[in-house]
Image (tube, rainbow, N blue to C red):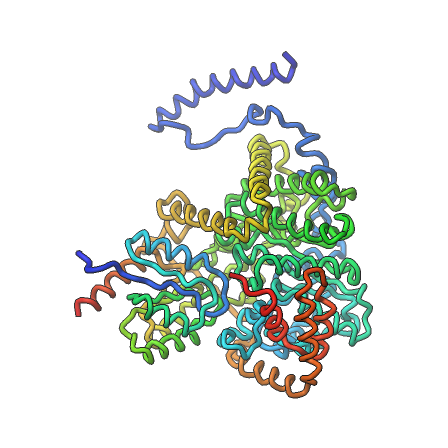
Amino acid sequence: MSSKEKEMEKIREARKKWEEGTLKKNLKRLGLEENPVELYTPLDLKDHSFLENVGFPGKFPFTAGRFAIPVLNALWGRGKTLGAGKAIRHAFGYSGYGTAEDMRDFYIERGKTPARGGGPNIAFDLPTQIGYDSDHELSEGEVGRVGVAVDTLKDFEIIYEPFTGDMELDKIASNWTINGTTNIILAMYIALAEKRGIPLDKLRGTPQNDILKEFVARGTQIFPVGPSMRMTRDTITYCTEHLPNMNTISICGYHMREAGATRVQAVAFAFANAMAYFQTVIDAGLDIDQFVGRTTFLNFGGGIEVLKEAACRRAARRVWAKIMRDRFGSKNPSHWIYKELGGGLSGYWTCTKQRPLNNLVRVAIGAVFSAMIGDPPILEPPFDEPLGLGHSVEARQLASDAARIIMEECRLADVQDALAGSYYVESLTDRYEKEIFELIQKIDEMGGAVKAVESGWMKDQVTQSALEYLNKMETGEVIQVGVNKYTEPDEIEVMTPRTSPYKIKRIEDAERRQIENLQEVKRQRDNRKVQSCLEKIENAARDEKVNLIPFFVDAVKEYATIGEICGVLRNVFGEAQ
Amino acid sequence: MEQSRRIRVLVAKVGLDGHDKGAILVSSRLRDAGMEVIYTGLRKTVDQVINSAIQEDVDVIGVSLLSGAHLSIAEKLLRKMEEKGIKDKLLIMGGVIPDKDIPELIKMGVSGVFTQSSSFNEMIDFIRERVNKAESK
């Protein structure tokens, strides 16, 4: 027997003695049949090896951290000029409403946005996301509502008016929450840059461009899965060649988590989707290391059971490293980590409309665990998210301050991977790794994520999990304070003032103004040229091998609308079911 | 109470909002409560919803909205219901709807609004009570 085995034997004996003695006595005293709390010991980490399972930050398998030094966290509040305390507002920069003019004025009034280089992080309205013009029947009531309306390049020209000089397109990065129409939005950015004489290789930005999760959870898919995957392939191959500094995709687990996926499902499905995208690009002839450095992840979502979330995140790092190194054969270790904007979150779905200030507590707890595993303590969402669209400036302030308290008062970034070596967290991390791989294997057996999405399996799995959670809420197995417990009449609603960052009045007539703008653009443009561009797109779309982005660039320069372009594509591709 | 027939509900997503977790969960719970539920799927126009409601001869039209377009969509739905002579059907709405808009929706003629702060049982009881009341008239 080795010394380690001897040590384990001793612990096993001691545990048995404790269970039969101290524990039993106390259970009896409290009238309990079994222990309501779990206890983890070295016995739960029998095959665990520090070097194999954890290792050093920035080194395979990256469990301890994706980076040797988690720069944003480590330098936060230490007088360095990385803008960390400000950078936390990056995610809050996500905004958009009304018409292009409304957004232009919004950026002018706010000055520099908090995103990289001060670039915009744009929310688009649903018609723009789903490829309908503002005057389409289905767009009625939706124009400028959940984001800014974009019909033509003209709108992009106006939105980007404030971004000149030291905020010119080659100095900023843009974020676009756009999926089905990514390549048209990208074409507008390219057209805008060409008009301004900015070399394309200087353009930086990130489109979301994760269409598979739209089918599963977010619902803005336009075309069937096959042609949708082709569009993603087009983004990646085109950008690799012409826009080498442009991120091509931001793969998300979080929408699926929000729709009900478990933490393991969210990570496994996001990875399976990522693998499907990468495979289409490899099939198009690129080497994994040529393009993967420009792919990113948004985040995997989260939940309020933060120790489990922390373990799952650490497992995700390990799983991804193994997928990149072993499955895709990536030779560059910096490509073995997932590049993620976010970090751990407590989840939007855990936030409640009842007593909404409690959400600040929830997201702060999520941010604590995020900081403890070396990820930025992003406090998302601001507390008033469940009350309707548009976070108040007060909610954003409270969220920013909480992040600063976590970092600069609690000093949670003074130690890296603080949870390492915890019997509980390490054994959970190992368990989640196994479960994530098992789920990926299951999807492999189905023929990969494309098949799993096409057949509706992935969505069904998410729905099933949502129903299981709902059952737990109803039986009280899962508690939400103020929702299914502590709702007696002597509990009170607590609220603060809320000021919208937007000019609400403008939203009300945005639709009328946007339709007028669109009609004006249509009057001014050369309709013959537009028709010819649309015909070329339609023909090109019929050949699966052709990259459509150059055709989109030509069309948007003639002020073809997103609805017109998607219209001809719908003719060829059909519509998502 | 004996029911002459099962209550029929059309659960609909109107407009472009793709968040369907709520609609799916509501459908499932109403089915558990013994109702017949037809779910339209995403992105239906007002006309499509009203036509389905007539074809399926439902008692209740339930619309799930998270995009903030609830006021204009409610107005269109109610106008169409009037036009087609199906004002007797219950129109209920749910989703992310700010409290301040609820009285306005009710004033317009929406029978009930159920948001995150409502329980499924509240909704089920409401539907049973209102449908039975309408039938006993």
The quadrant where residue A214 appears: bottom right
Q: Residue at point 34% right, 67% down?
A: B61
Q: Is residue A547 left or right of residue A464?
A: right
- Whole-percent x, y for residue A45 in the image: 59, 27
- In the image, residue A214 sits, relative to residue A428, either above or below, namely below
- In the image, residue A46 sits, relative to residue A429, either above or below, namely above
Q: Residue at point 76% right, 74% down?
A: A164
- Whole-percent x, y for residue A509 in the image: 52, 81
Nearest the viewer among A232 and A91 is A232
- Whole-percent x, y for residue A183 in the image: 67, 65
Q: How many marks?
A: 0
Q: Residue at point 43% right, 71% down?
A: B70
Nearest the viewer among B99 and A147 is A147
The quadrant where residue A10 appears: top right
Nearest the viewer among B45 and A362 is B45
Q: Is residue B44 left or right of residue B55?
A: right
Nearest the viewer among A176 and A121 is A176
- In the image, residue A149 sits, relative to residue A28, either above or below, namely below
- The answer to whether residue A191 is seen in the rendering is yes
Quarter that holds the N terminus of chain A: top right
- The answer to whether residue A156 is seen in the rendering is no
Q: Is residue A42 left or right of residue A475?
A: right
Q: Residue at point 54% right, 53% down?
A: A454
- Whole-percent x, y for residue A197 in the image: 82, 74
Which residue of the protein is positioned furthest toward the top in this rendering? A1
